[in-house]
Amino acid sequence: MDVTQEVKAVLDEVLSLNGRSAAFTRETHLLGAIPELDSMAVVSLITRLEEHFGLTVDDDDMDGSTFATVGALVDFVDAKLAS
């Protein structure tokens, strides 16, 4: 499973980016850089990641840095999958 590609696909789907996520790299900034990623979208994104990857995210599992970049989000998902 290519977690990076799957996270990018979930981002594209939830944020309705129409394929823009294909150009994202690990260094691509998310929060504050992508207008579609507002507080409501964060909740939807978490829910979709839980469904897609079959994981559970608790409130205290994350903070703003989780959504700082694509790489940070991928690392977070990888860590949840490993636990």
Image (cartoon, rainbow, N blue to C red):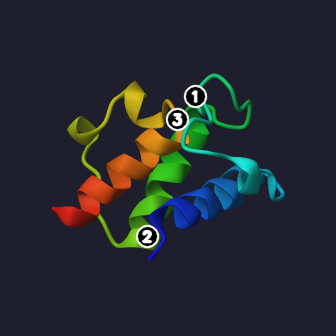
Which is nearer the N-term, disc 2 or disc 3? 2
When asked about the image quadrant of residue 82, the answer is: bottom left
CA separation, marks 2 and 3? 21 Å
Residue 52 lies, with reference to residue 42, above or below; the image says below
Residue 53 left/right relative to 43: left
Point 39% across, 28% down: residue: 65
Which mark sits nearer the N-terminus, 1 or 2? 1
Quarter location, residue 80: bottom left
Q: What element carries label 3?
A: loop
Mark seen at residue 69: 3
Q: Is residue 44 above or below residue 9?
A: above
Q: Can residue 48 be seen in this view?
A: yes
| Quadrant containing the C terminus in the rendered view | bottom left
Q: Residue furthest left?
A: 83
Query: Which residue is label 2 attached to?
Result: 51
Tell me, yes or no, whether the two marked residues, 1 and 2, touch with CB atoms within 8 Å.
no
Residue 56 appears in the picture as rendered? no
Give the residue type at disc 1: Leu
Label 2's element? helix
Residue in the image at 52% along x and 35% along y:
69
Q: Sort mark 2 into few (<14), some (14-19) or many (20+) by Cα contacts within 10 Å.
A: few
